[in-house]
Amino acid sequence: MAEDLSGRHLKDEVTPYPLYVRRRDFLKSAGLIGSVAATAGLYRWLNPVGKVELNTASLNTNVEPTLTQEQRLAQGFITNDELTSESDIISYNNFYEFTT
């Protein structure tokens, strides 16, 4: 077996293969996590979250309590349409790419 000048075996200076492989996996994982964090940070920097303020009237002020059913129907507050069935509601998908 080869020895260095101090008499130690050179085999003892080499990193064991399982530890070498784990270290490479760790470096790959660290690089992946770093790139994901950098991408998320860049996305947040380019697309900041803005504060949304709603200036809408309260629901109570929109409807006159003295209106009759016919007046509410004429103003669009109510309709004569029948209610949609629950099975149609829960099975409807507006995203065409998720359907066959």
Image: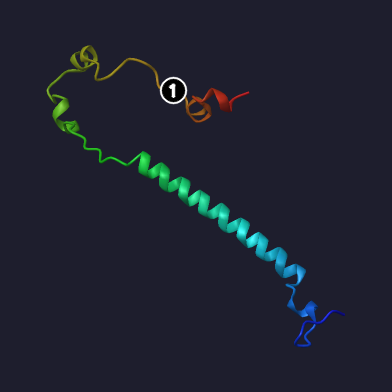
Q: Is residue 29 left or right of residue 84?
A: right
Identity of the residue furthest to the right in this view = 1
**Other residues around mark 1 within 10 Å, as few (<14) / some (14–19) / many (≥20):** few
Residue nearer the viewer, 79 or 26: 26
Left-right relation of 8 to 82: right
Q: Residue at x 12, y 23 (%)?
A: 66
Question: Which corner quadrant holds the N terminus?
Answer: bottom right
Looking at the rendered structure, the number of numbered marks drawn on it comes to: 1
In which quadrant is the C terminus drawn?
Answer: top right
Residue furthest bottom as drawn: 7
| SS state under label 1 | loop
Q: Position of residue 74 (x, y in %)?
A: 22, 11
What residue appears at the point 57 percent right and 55 percent down from the top-left corner? 31
Q: Residue at x 54, y 22 (%)?
A: 96
Q: Is residue 97 left or right of residue 72?
A: right
On screen, residue 68 above or below 86: above
Q: In the visual, does 27 lie left or right of 86?
A: right
User: Quadrant location of residue 68?
Assistant: top left
Q: Which residue extends farthest front? A: 5
Q: Is residue 95 above or below residue 16?
A: above
Residue 84 in the image: above or below residue 53: above
Q: What residue is shown with label 1?
A: 84
The kind of residue tagged 1 is: Thr
| Residue 9 drawn at (x, y percent) | 80, 82
Q: Nearer the viewer, residue 7 or 52?
A: 7
Q: Residue at x 20, y 14 (%)?
A: 75
The image shows residue 11 at horizontal and vertical percentages of 80, 77
